[in-house]
Amino acid sequence: MNKKKRRFGDRYDGRILKNVDPFFKIIPYIMKSRVDAQVYFDDKIILTKTEKFLLEKREEKINIGFLHIVCAAMVRTISQKPKLNRFVSGRKMFARNGIYISLAVKKDMTEDSPETTVKVKFKPTDTIFDVVEKVNRVINESQGQKTSNETDKTAKMISMCPRFVISILVKFLTWLDKHGKMPKVINEVSPFHTSLFITDMGSLGIRPVYHHIYDFGTTSIFIAFGIKNKEKVFDRNNNIIERKFIDMKIVVDERICDGFYYAKALRIFKRYMENPHLLEKAPDKVVEDNEI
């Protein structure tokens, strides 16, 4: 995304939407929090072509996982449907500067292992291979029992304060954020200031759940996916076949765009998920938000 001149009302992390439909200017005053504005989607991702793609890449010595495909598919979808990358703060709507995805990661796959959260920055032109490199680098830097990223360090420092100080500090930071004055250092380490959250519940051996989107920060989308499942269906010739699929649960902030736009965007996302070879090349064009 090209860097543009900052205008009155813009934040360092987003550009104010000045040409948005009047109804959407009013909505944040009616639905004041993300909890009020949560909408739930669920879909089924058929894995036939996805698993074939993953197997082909492993044979080429390229280690790609399902999480990488989810991230890459969302990055590509946002590059074509940029309204997904909006957020509401202080009753105003903004187009985010940059694409960010936050991920919850276990330091080790044990029950007692602590969990950390990482935030990865992407470009709208990133391919699946760019996404794999960026995600792996950030996760590798954060894993290990003795490793702490900046998010962990900041959380630990705040947690050492008395409870009343933590309460005052969070309220103050929330106030600053609503006025676009949140210190950049906090924004950079905060996993809550992100385009979307993704959680891999399949790695825990369970089905996905609908996860709320946070009031603190600027997250507008939360995606959860779980374990692989099998089902028997009729093919085009009325023969019974078995196929694998993964359920996805998606929670969104309905204030950032209308339902029709969400529906089209999620169809595009599903298409990339089920045809990941489309992510091997950069997009032909990147669509800009036309209501800035």
Image (spheres, rainbow, N blue to C red):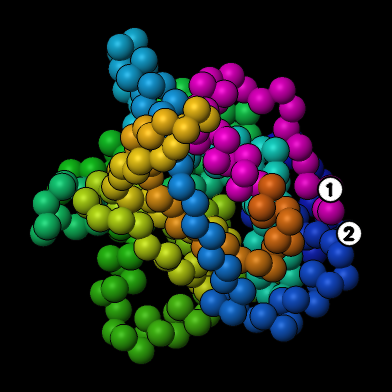
Residue range of the region highlighted in magenta in the rendering? 265-292
In the rendered structure, find residue 290 and report the number of the disc placed on it.
1
Q: Residue at x 62, y 22 (%)?
A: 282
Image coordinates of residue 24 in percent, x first then y, are: 79, 69
Q: Residue furthest bottom?
A: 164
Image coordinates of residue 77 in percent, x first then y, are: 62, 40
Which image quadrant is residue 190 in? bottom left
Judge whether residue 254 is colored magenta: no
Sooner in the amino-acid sequence: mark 1 or mark 2: 2
Tell me how far mark 1 sits from mark 2, CA to CA.
8 Å
- Secondary element under disc 1, as helix, strand or loop, is loop
* Residue 136 in sight here: no
Lateral position of residue 92 relative to residue 235, left or right: right
Which image quadrant is residue 256 in? bottom right
Q: Residue at x 50, y 82 (%)?
A: 171
Q: Neighbour class for label 2 at 10 Å: few (<14), some, many (≥20)?
A: few
Identity, as a three-letter code, of the amino acid under mark 1: Asn
Q: Residue furthest top?
A: 60
Q: Which residue is mark 2?
A: 19
